[in-house]
Amino acid sequence: MKRGARLGEVKRVLVVDDDPTVSEVVAGYLHRAGFAVEVSADGPAAVARAAARPPDLVVLDLMLPGMDGLEVCRRLREQGPLPVIMLTARGDEEDRILGLEFGADDYVTKPFSPRELVLRVESVLRRAGAPTAAGSAAAEPWLRAGPLALHPAARRATRHGTELALTIREFDLLEFFLRNPGRATSREELMRRVWGWEFGDLSTVTVHVRRLREKVEDDPARPRLISTVWGVGYRLDAPAPQENDGDGAGDAR
């Protein structure tokens, strides 16, 4: 069985790159891994195609002519939650950070191994989660801290009862913190536990923590939920859950 088939129904991947050689190689590897692949050579075409028929994941080159990858990523995010893996040039740390800040879930630096890209695609799609049977989803408890509530199986998170629009990595990061309240965790461990990488650019963790704070803190510049532990990493300071948030979790308590 091809690997893509193990993720459930055949997943569709949109590859956006103006270099036909790169697109052809990437599409070929993804096809062989069991994915259905579509290709766009520019940003406007990619945004239009994703709006007409949303893919399960987008592989997006940062350096596109005209509408660059950052703007494409922003517009894709406006359409709804959609996993994005950004392709960036090696050494362009600022571009990688910008890509993550614009909502990319992961990145791969050029030149890259197509096999590595396939593994990243599979990893992100696994974390996106397949739909869960209603019975098992209802049986799993919500994780709570202060104004936050998160349901792992349903892939839902709320703040004061309002649904949070989180990327896949942001959701996984928040879930890790909620499962480990009061525990200081290094960026290296977060990289291993949340991303599944033994090594990588630790600025990835920093950017995702910053983006998560922007969505869960009253004042992200003075965080009270996700604290920085200097010389160590980060810690979720978990106040008592706030009741009657209207997050739809009452039947799961």
Image (tube, rainbow, N blue to C red):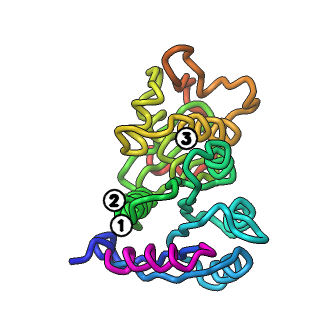
Q: Is disc 1 placed on a helix, strand or loop?
A: loop
Is residue 129 visible in the rendered image? The answer is no
- Residue farthest along the top direction in this orientation: 231
Q: 134 or 84, which is in the foreground?
A: 84
Marks 1/3: CA–CA distance: 33 Å
- Range of the magenta residues? 17-33
Is residue 89 visible in the rendered image? The answer is yes
- Residue farthest along the right direction in this orientation: 66
- What residue did someone put label 3 on? 204
**Crowdedness near tag 2: few (<14), some (14–19) or many (≥20) residues, C-alpha within 10 Å:** few
Q: Is residue 24 magenta?
A: yes
Amino acid at dot 2? Ser
Residue 25, picture quadrant? bottom left
**Crowdedness near tag 1: few (<14), some (14–19) or many (≥20) residues, C-alpha within 10 Å:** few
Amino acid at dot 1? Ala
Position of residue 36 measured from the top left corner of the image (x, y, whole percent) = 43, 82
Is 230 situated above or below 71?
Answer: above
Q: Is disc 2 placed on a helix, strand or loop?
A: helix
Q: Earlier in the sequence, mark 2 or mark 3?
A: 2
Rendered residue at 33%/59% (across/down): 136
Q: Earlier in the sequence, mark 1 or mark 3?
A: 1
Horizontal arrangement in the rendering, residue 12 relative to residue 9 (left or right): right
Position of residue 137 measured from the top left corner of the image (x, y, whole percent) = 39, 58
- What residue did someone put label 1 on? 133
Is 67 situated above or below 41?
Answer: above
Residue 17, picture quadrant? bottom right
Amino acid at dot 3? Thr
Q: Are marks 1 and 2 in contact (CB under 8 Å)?
A: yes
- What residue did someone put label 2 on? 136
